[in-house]
Amino acid sequence: MTTQRWILVFIFSLASDTCRTFGSGIVQPFKGESYYVRSDCPFTLTSFTVNRGEYSVTIRRGRNGLLVQVEIIINKVMTLLQNGHVVVQNKSVSLPYDHTYQHIVKYGIYTKLRSSLLPFTVTWHNVDGGINSLWVTLESELSTDMCGLCGKQNLAGHRHELIRDSQLHDLRCKTRDPVLQKNHVCSQFFRKTKSCLQDNNSHFHQLCRDNIFGFENSHEVFCPFFQEVASQCNQSRINRFWRRLTRCEKPSCPGDLIYEKKGPAFIPSCSNPDPAPFYQELTETCVCPRDKVFNNHAIGHHCIPESSCSCEFAGKSYGNGEIRSSKCQSCTCHGGKWRCSENLCHRKCVIEGQFVTTFDGKQYVLPRKCLYVASKGPNWMITIQFNQKGLSLRKVMVHLSKELFVFKNSKVVFEGKPSSCLAIQNESTRPVVYISKFSYLLKSSCSSTHPTSPMTRSKVFVAIATVTPQMTSPPTAGSLRTQLNHSLCRGVWVIVTGTYPATAPTVKMNKEAQCWV
């Protein structure tokens, strides 16, 4: 068998930023003429480099005509599509899947991989035996060094060169010549499309015969082609007859789901009963009957009223009306959503030298000794500034509405003047900042004649403390970070000093300062 490729040409009016491959070997490049090649050899569909990051999609068809293996590489992270599974870096993953460089989700009846680095997506349709349709979308012009069957975005390539340069070396594979043979279904179909396709009708007809030969009983191979032509014509007359003529059934949906030709890519579910408008892209999809949502908390594909949805927490499922309790709060499952009492436990953000622990427990290191915003709200902000000579804070500034508190050199400056409301032990100038995420009413008074008249009365979310010695790494659980929560008086700004004792440090306040809980 020779390696000569038989290539037939036709033109689809697709946007130049989309490349498709479907059926048993049809390729629609980013720009230029579409063509057909029959081969079980591996090919580069597209490959390019952006900012030294390599991106590529490699495909291989099986003898059943379907794509049996697809490799997607995004900045050295390889995703393999094979046997209906998604494998990332040699590990099988479930969907939805989030990674630093990519996100993979179910997208209607399709599956979509979106790069988080570039406007680059790969979408495919799984069927029994492989993938019968796959397309690559580039939402902007990215690179001029592109190669592969898809060609370049802005320059039409020669079909012979595209195939020759894209085939990967494999001695076990073959590229076959097509057999010129008529097909009754193709002939009937294209007799009815002349008014739509006009001069291109014969090209489509020849492509249909090449695509279907040897796969006359494989709906997974020839149905995507007929569907593509029907969607390009977009005529109601063709839409009415093509499925009946070709015997291509509508895609089947599992369980209680119902097929829709144009529906939401992300259907309402117990976890997300009202997807944001951003997600309401229309595509072929499977939806629940009216007034029901997809029960994604249970095995199978069932639709239930939203009021019957269960809730999940820490990997455990709770039925509608069930209660879970902790030392901080209690929550009741109500129609898939948690209704919780007030959280009595404070969450803290901790800044120790250049080490940061966020409100949700994540840890990282600040890259430089600069001025940073530690936390902010609608009418308050906390900024920190580092010493240039050491891993310590030079000053902490608390902006509360129009008031400014500055903590520096063991002193508190309010409105540009040293404040006597809060006393600071002069034992260390190396502060650790604790920011407690809890709303409370701050009241303090420095008046000896009117001690009950408040000087400030504002809702704040913070409590700040300094400790010593300076930390070079985040403290362990149960250390001063935990003890401090029990030692601070709620509702007052406090500066705490001392070493790391076995017990919590003593909070020393100016005798004129007052604290209301």
Image (cartoon, rainbow, N blue to C red):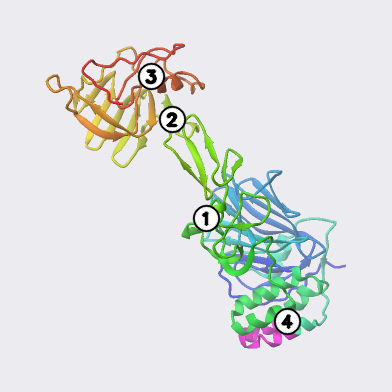
The image position of residue 401, as x and y in percent, is 24, 37
Quadrant placement of the C terminus: top left
Residue hosting label 4: 245
Label 2 crowd (10 A; few <14 / some 14-19 / many >=20): few
Quadrant placement of the N terminus: bottom right
Q: Vertical placement of 121 versus 223: above or below?
A: above
- Say which element carries label 1: loop
Residue hosting label 3: 487
Residue 36 is one of the magenta-drawn residues: no
The magenta stretch spans which residues?
A: 188-206
**Amino acid type, callout 2:** Cys
**Amino acid type, callout 1:** Pro
Q: Is the Cβ of the residue at disc 1 closer than 8 Å to that at disc 4?
A: no
Q: Residue at x 65, y 77 (%)?
A: 229
Compared across the picture, whether 145 is left or right of 249 comes to left
Residue hosting label 1: 273
The alpha-carbon separation of the residues under discs 2 and 3 comes to 14 Å
- Say which element carries label 2: loop
Q: Main secondary structure of the magenta part?
A: helix
Q: Which mark is residue 345?
A: 2
- In which image quadrant can residue 485 be found? top left
The image position of residue 491, as x and y in percent, is 30, 27
The alpha-carbon separation of the residues under discs 1 and 2 comes to 29 Å
The image position of residue 274, as x and y in percent, is 49, 57
**Amino acid type, callout 4:** Leu
Residue 194 is one of the magenta-drawn residues: yes
N-terminal label among 1 and 4: 4
The alpha-carbon separation of the residues under discs 4 and 2 comes to 66 Å
Q: Is the Cβ of the residue at disc 4 closer than 8 Å to that at disc 2?
A: no
